[in-house]
Amino acid sequence: MRLSVAAVALIVAVVVGCRPSAPAGHRSPVLRLVIPDELKTLDPAHAYDTYSSAVSHAICTGLVDYDEGTSLVPDLAAGWEISDQGRRYEFTLRPGVRFSTGAPVTSEDCRASLERVMRPETASNVRSFLAGIVGAREVMEGRAGRCTGIATPAADRLVIRLKEPSPTFLYVLAMNLGAILPRDTARRPPEEVSWRPIGAGPYRVARWDGTTLTLAPNPHHPDATQLRPIALETRASDPALMMARFAAGEVHVLPLVPPAELARVRHDPALRGRFLEKPVNQTWYLGMNTRMKPFDDARVRRAVSLAINRQRQAQLEGAGVVATGMLPPTMPGHDPDLVPDPHDPRRARELLAEAGHWQGLRTTMWITPSYRRRAEAIQADLRAVGIEVELRVVDLPTYLDGYKRENTAPCWYGGWYPDYPDPSSFLEVLFHSRNISPTKSLNATRYSNPEVDRLLDRAARMPLGEARLALYREAERRILADAPVVPLYYEVETRLWQPGVEGVEIHPVWRYLRLGRLRLR
Amino acid sequence: MTVAAQDAKPMPAWRRRPLLALGLGILAAVVFAALAAPWLAPHDPEAQSSLVMPQPPSAEHPLGTDSLGRDLLSRLLYGARHSLAIGVCATAIALGIGLAVGLPAGYRGGAIDALLMRAVDLVMAFPSILLAAAMAAVLPTRNLATVLLVIGLVNWTAAARVIRSEVLSLCERTYVEAARALGASTGRLLVRHIAPHLAPTLLVLASLNAGTAILLDTGLNYLGMGLPPPTPTWGDLLREAQQWYSTAPWLVIWPGLAVVVTVAAVNLIAFDLQRAPR
């Protein structure tokens, strides 16, 4: 009898344990979300990848943020004034703003937060973005504790002085590194902040068990009453399984519709109004090392550009828009008049013959496993014109090291999305000869054109506006004429959500959901 | 009765050993398909079309196409060549290493035996697929030869152990002791008196090992650590099929079936050889 009671208990336990969790439909008290990757940190001084930065941004916000597009709007700041020809920024803090602890946000907190990013013991990999502030170098090198370029004339006023005018400084402050923490938190060791950061954002960390992050609304945030707690499951990496779990109602928002399901989802009347697809600030390209054979010859690079079927590349991952240049349509400075090279294998073969490769040539393309399918399509395109490509499939760290190291990767499949929506973070970073270095070369194609350098330098010194963007367009045209890269397609993101969920968006800069904007009826 | 007994025909070999016959039959079919792939395959296995979605089976593509428009049947047939090559060659390497370790360990015993067997324990402490993936990751280039080597190098431990224990037992046999008493050298003892008696054991080991090698290779390719694209391998076909299993199940079914049937055939042969009287 004892045995049978135990058996019944076991069966009940198994049945209860195996039952799917309650569907994420109406009246669910918690928003259940997933991210395909692991969550690396919540510390705004370190959060730099797509998911960590988006989640950290829900907890720790900064002085400025983006609207639905790429324009900056005040966040913790009520407004700002720029003077001294773009060297002095004075921010006025929004009255009544409080951290999740209840403490008011003051200019001293802002100073402590920015200095925290600069300090060597924080070991932030993004601190160089603040190097333009007067006195920042001294703090970064450990020679000073306080940054002389940051002043706090009043509890609600912050002044930042720059060494040189920088039209992109506000964009830098909109990154995670510009997030404001209470000054006592900012002085704690980084490991104490990693998973328990305090901020003035819409959410605070309730629990982190290594797999699922539970966020509770910040009771002092103006939107607190409209927010629901969030259970964010990490490492949900199987897209097909996620789709099945979404269909079963276990997940409120699917951040990426698997390519295999996209055609069905687009035409499913039941999902109308709950599906979104939109381009973001990311360009996929084929990069070629202009100092390695055979790509040291511009005719070979042009031939590659003509040999690749961009339309097919754009469709292989489900959604994508054929790239006409490096700057995506959501990016200020995008040139709508650019036309991509046609898919013209015959002309490609002629160019190769002109370059002396009438018998064909061999090269190696570096890729990570996730680029494999798209790279195989390029491999077939290039084989059709006589270029035999060996695909070198390596893990991400080897790939990142390899294609940026001199004389290592002749060509590679790459994707770039910028830190902020300014053409400089595409064109200057990737194509200015100043950024060529033996290892970790940001200009990995090692493209060097003095005229392009001059255009980029001139544009970088100009204030934001149409004249500056015109210079970037001119630089982009010259770069494309030299073809160090073949722009393939602009990334298009997809979202699917359950009835009752509101505020789902695809933002060109914040690549995951902006959690503070989600609502659940 | 006597007459009837005299009239009875001897039972054909395939009825006496049906498992062996079945295994050999399936394996022969796979070998034939692999060897005749250039004639049997309806398309170039690497030829892509302009498609970006897998196509279901049709008259032109009897097993359908993958998401790059490549004919699945042709890729399966060419993939069989790779899998069988791995099964045979990696097994040869593994048995070679197994013999090189198992023979001296079993024959010499003592410190040499202890040392060699601890080396075996060390390699066995790591899961084979993990060890193979780690080795493949540090290879400067990946081609058939290096993949063969990796699989051979992680797949020899069971062979070494079995050969050692078999040699230990053979060394006790009277004919070995007699040869030793007559002054036969170690080399002669090993080559003339011990090695020939290992043959049945080696045959069983080879068939077991071939199945494991094919599975290991499939696993490596599934993880993207096998041969570089576009060479078709069964593991690679399964990896590619992963994201399409709900919308294009044929991409999973056929390569999966190919692996299961081939490994099952090899294991049937091993099973029969193990049970066969020596």
Image (tube, helix red, strand yellow):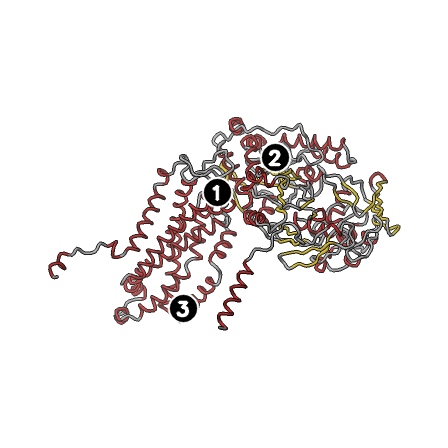
* Residue B8, image x, y percentages: 16, 56
* Residue A208, image x, y percentages: 66, 58
| Mark 2 and mark 1: Cα distance apart in space | 25 Å
- Residue in the foreground of this view, choosing between A93 and B91: A93
Relative vertical location of residue B189 with respect to residue B133 in this rendering, above or below: below
Q: On residue B248, which mark appears? A: 1
* Residue located at (53% from left, 62% from top): A14
Which amino acid type corresponds to the residue marked 3 in the rendered image? Asp
Which of labels 1 and 3 is toward the front?
1
Relative vertical location of residue A507 with respect to residue B86 in this rendering, above or below: above
Determine which residue is flagged by label 2. Answer: A321
Q: On residue B113, which mark appears? A: 3
A38 sits left or right of A81 in the view: left
Which of labels 2 and 1 is toward the front?
1
Marks counted in the figure total: 3
* Residue A324, image x, y percentages: 63, 31
Q: On residue B41, which mark appears? A: none
- Residue in the foreground of this view, choosing between A454 and B147: B147
Which of labels 2 and 3 is toward the front?
2
Q: Chain of mark 2?
A: A
Q: Are marks 2 and 1 in contact (CB under 8 Å)?
A: no
Disc 2 crowd rating (10 Å Cα; few below 14, some 14-19, many 20+) is many
Which secondary structure lies at badge 1?
A: loop
- Residue in the foreground of this view, choosing between A507 and B81: A507
Q: Chain of mark 1?
A: B
Q: Earlier in the sequence, mark 1 or mark 3?
A: 3
Which amino acid type corresponds to the residue marked 1 in the rendered image? Ala
Q: Are dots 1 and 3 on a single chain? A: yes
Q: Are marks 2 and 3 in contact (CB under 8 Å)?
A: no
A345 sits left or right of A69 in the view: left
